[in-house]
Image (spheres, helix red, strand yellow):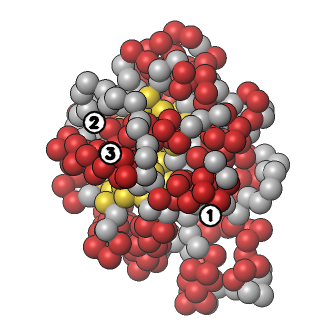
């Protein structure tokens, strides 16, 4: 298929993005305006000149270089109006990609320097998401992230606040941050509390740390989904566990490449995992920092790993099944997607016998 037709087909596919960070997806023009409103001077003469500070362009040198992009925006994100605006604009960006369902994650404790409580941070983000849903017709949910380098006390606060917003669009809790230095087992008590409150759990694991973290996340922290999971193959027993329990991997190819979760594209195990019957989903991680879109991510799969458009469609349906939504909502979404795929001439493989009740 010629490249332009393929790109058009990929654009037209209805999509989902389950792994998308709020602070990694801020438009340069928006940051420019926020800085002006807050009277903060930026090291650039125009909004366009912010690109090197906010985006990884070309080959990223290291994980550290990747994380510097988050440090650059961190100081601007402590006011409710700002959080609401950037959440709203993430929904807008999803709509531009013909993405129909998104889960936007953020660390409530990272936005409190000007006095907001965890509840106020969550409320502001969810307001932006709801406004975006109404204006752009994208279903949008929030995921509250605990941080690996934060104390159990601060992370418990996040879990508690998240649970209070469960009926208002806060779909799940997550664990993010420096995986290598702070392994998953340090956070058992926090996630036992999340399970006690019946909050769905996804955990970043197997990105900068090994397969042990994935095992811990599933067995002790109650994760039904794993963020990235690139290093799963380092332990065949854990890989079998992930397959048997149909744990969902939220893979983010361009981000995984940029953060050096694998040495090179040749060693990226996405084809291997797909062929082994693992439940994979494809996500963007950070629209701005990774300078990506779902179309770019799918294009990597097609060009570097030989995925077909029908296989991409089946990955998208995995995302629908794995959504932290009630089963009836997922079935509706699945039916809509199947109809759209059929109109585009795609026939993804038969659906699994049951839709997981993660929501
Ligand atoms: Zn992430």
The kind of secondary structure element at disc 1 is loop
The circle drawn on residue 302 is none
Of callouts 3 and 2, which one flags the residue occurring earlier in the amino acid sequence?
A: 3
- Is the C-beta separation of discs 1 and 3 under 8 Å? no
Of callouts 2 and 1, which one flags the residue occurring earlier in the amino acid sequence?
A: 1
Pointer 3: residues within 10 angstroms few (<14), some, or many (20+)?
many
Q: Mark 2 points at which residue?
A: 358
Pointer 1: residues within 10 angstroms few (<14), some, or many (20+)?
many
Of callouts 1 and 3, which one flags the residue occurring earlier in the amino acid sequence?
A: 1
Spatial CA span between label 1 and label 3: 30 Å
Q: Name the residue under label 1.
A: 288
Residue 151, x across and y down, in percent: 47, 43
Pointer 2: residues within 10 angstroms few (<14), some, or many (20+)?
some
The circle drawn on residue 338 is 3
Does residue 20 lie above or below 50 as drawn?
Answer: above
Q: Residue at x 48, y 69 (%)?
A: 96
């Amino acid at each position: 298929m010629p490249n332009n037709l393929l790109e058009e087909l990929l654009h037209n596919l209805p999509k989902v993005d389950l792994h998308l960070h709020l602070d990694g997806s801020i438009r340069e023009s928006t940051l420019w305006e926020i800085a002006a409103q807050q009277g903060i001077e930026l090291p650039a003469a125009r909004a366009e000149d912010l690109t090197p500070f906010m985006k990884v362009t070309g080959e990223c040198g290291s994980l550290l270089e990747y994380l510097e992009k988050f440090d650059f925006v961190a100081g601007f994100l402590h006011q409710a109006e700002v959080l609401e605006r950037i959440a709203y604009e993430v929904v807008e960006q999803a709509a531009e990609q013909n993405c129909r369902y998104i889960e936007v994650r953020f660390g409530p404790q990272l936005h409190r320097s000007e006095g907001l409580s965890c509840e106020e941070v969550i409320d502001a983000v969810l307001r932006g998401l709801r406004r975006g849903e109404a204006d752009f017709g994208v279903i949008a949910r929030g995921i509250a992230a605990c941080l690996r380098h934060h104390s159990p006390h601060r992370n418990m606060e996040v879990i508690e606040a998240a649970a209070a917003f469960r009926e208002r669009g806060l779909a799940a809790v997550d664990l993010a941050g420096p995986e290598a230095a702070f392994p998953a087992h340090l956070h058992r008590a926090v996630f036992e509390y999340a399970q006690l409150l019946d909050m769905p759990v996804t955990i970043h694991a197997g990105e900068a740390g090994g397969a042990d973290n994935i095992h811990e996340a599933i067995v002790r922290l109650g994760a039904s989904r794993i963020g990235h999971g690139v290093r799963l193959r380092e332990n065949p027993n854990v890989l079998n566990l992930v397959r048997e329990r149909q744990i969902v991997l939220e893979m983010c190819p361009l981000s995984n490449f940029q953060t050096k979760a694998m040495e090179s594209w040749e060693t990226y195990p996405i084809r291997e995992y797909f062929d082994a019957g693992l439940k994979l989903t494809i996500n963007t991680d950070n629209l701005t920092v990774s300078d990506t879109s779902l179309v770019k991510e799918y294009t990597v799969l097609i060009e570097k790993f030989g995925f077909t458009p029908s296989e991409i469609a089946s990955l998208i349906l995995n995302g629908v099944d794995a959504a932290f939504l009630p089963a009836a909502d997922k079935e509706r979404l699945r039916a809509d997607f199947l109809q759209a795929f059929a109109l585009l001439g795609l026939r993804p493989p038969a659906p699994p016998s049951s839709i997981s009740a993660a929501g």
